[in-house]
Amino acid sequence: MGGSILLGEQHGISVVDFKPFLDGSHSEKRQVADAILDSFKRVGFVYLVNHGIPQEKIKTMFEWSKRFFDQPMEVKQLAPHPPSGTHHRGYSAPDVEKVVQHVYDDKELKNLRTKAPDVKESFECGWEENAGMPNIWLPDDVLPGFKDVCMDFYWTCHETELHILRAITTALGIPAAHLVDYHNGHDNQLRLLHYPSVPAAQLAQERLARIDAHSDFGSITLLLQDGVGGLEVEDPHSPGQFRSAAPIEDALIVNAGDFMMRWSNDVIRSTVHRVRAPPNASPADGMVPDRYSIPYFCAPEFTAVVECLPGTFSDENPPKYEPISAEQYILQRLAATY
């Protein structure tokens, strides 16, 4: 593996230079693809530098995100998230959503929310023409420009998503367009997240949570985060043990979701992760600072029915899963978060 492509690791998560995949030789593209797949197989996450999303656009999106969350509550509530988790659009106030791992019983969900609410607020948007899950924006005269910036960033992330999907298929030795053909960006989700400052002691005692342990449920997730930190990834070989996935300057974190794990016949790993207090956080005032992050959740076209990818099964290792539609799988998971 060329030293210029594999730049190091962070608690087992590879740090990969993505630029040679974007404009390098066939050999360099293959090396990048293999490095990404190796990290996905081992831990389900990879850091990408030179990922193709312009840093100026990232900076602008974070500025608009902060501007949105700085609005008074009554203004943010002008774009309210519906009561149902299956219409995942608009603004969610702190303590409303509870991210969980495979819990679908209403009573159990309520108990979890009461025990340690997720102290975060979010805004979600998707494809503007998605009639099944329409966007919910602020009125046009409130925070003008916010919608346009979100939509531009949404499609910018989609371009990088397609490059990463091509890298996965390249490493699997199947046609480059195989995954791309299922992902037209119509069922993706751009999420702006703000974790307010909270008492460090309450986080440490699990009386509050930022985001509890969970896995994502789409194909892949692209994550941009500020410098505060707090993301932790479970050690696949030591369940219950979490390791910091600290921010790396100008890097994009990419993780595989449960649907991709199923699609790849478990070749690719979807790993449980959470957000806690930043490592070594001992603030003088006892408060953990605010944190901002921007995940971009990627999913195949909801109508698509998929079966295990070519090359991920054989006579000795047959497909573990029946064909399933993305809609059937993802909406069930979304419904459990509200």
Image (cartoon, helix red, strand yellow):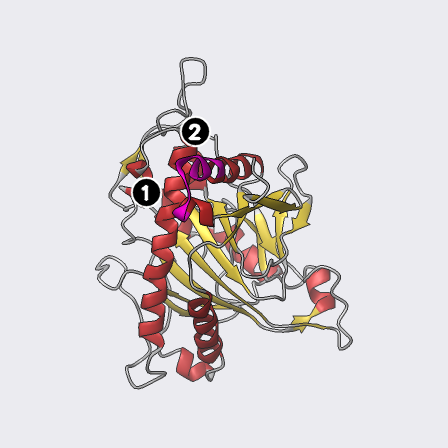
Q: Is residue 24 magenta?
A: yes
**Residue 189 sits in which quadrant?**
bottom left
In the rendered view, does 17 fall on the left or right side of 29?
A: right
> Residue at label 1?
326
Q: Residue at x 48, y 71 (%)?
A: 59
Is 178 magenta? The answer is: no
Magenta stretch in the rendered image: 22-31
Q: Nearer the viewer, residue 134 or 314?
A: 314
Asked whether the beta carbons under mark 1 and mark 2 sit within 8 Å of each other, the answer is: no
Mark 1 to mark 2 CA distance (whole Å): 15 Å
Q: Where on the picture, by quarter, is residue 112? A: bottom right
Residue 232 shows up from this direction: yes
**Horizontal arrangement in the rendering, residue 136 relative to residue 202 (left or right):** left
In the rendered picture of this protein, how many numbered marks are placed on residues? Answer: 2
Q: Amino acid at mark 2?
A: Asn
Mark whose residue sits in front, 1 or 2: 2
- The secondary structure making up most of the magenta span is helix
Q: Residue at x 63, y 44 (%)?
A: 234
Mark on residue 265? 2
90 over 67 or under it: above or below: above
Q: Position of residue 171 (x, y in %)?
A: 43, 33
The image quadrant where one finds the N terminus is: top right
Q: Amino acid at mark 1?
A: Ala
The image position of residue 195, as x and y in percent, is 56, 69
Q: Position of residue 143 (x, y in %)?
A: 36, 83
Instruction: List x then y, in percent, for residue 138.
Output: 33, 78
Q: Nearer the viewer, residue 245 or 324?
A: 245
Give the structural element (helix, strand or loop) at label 2: loop
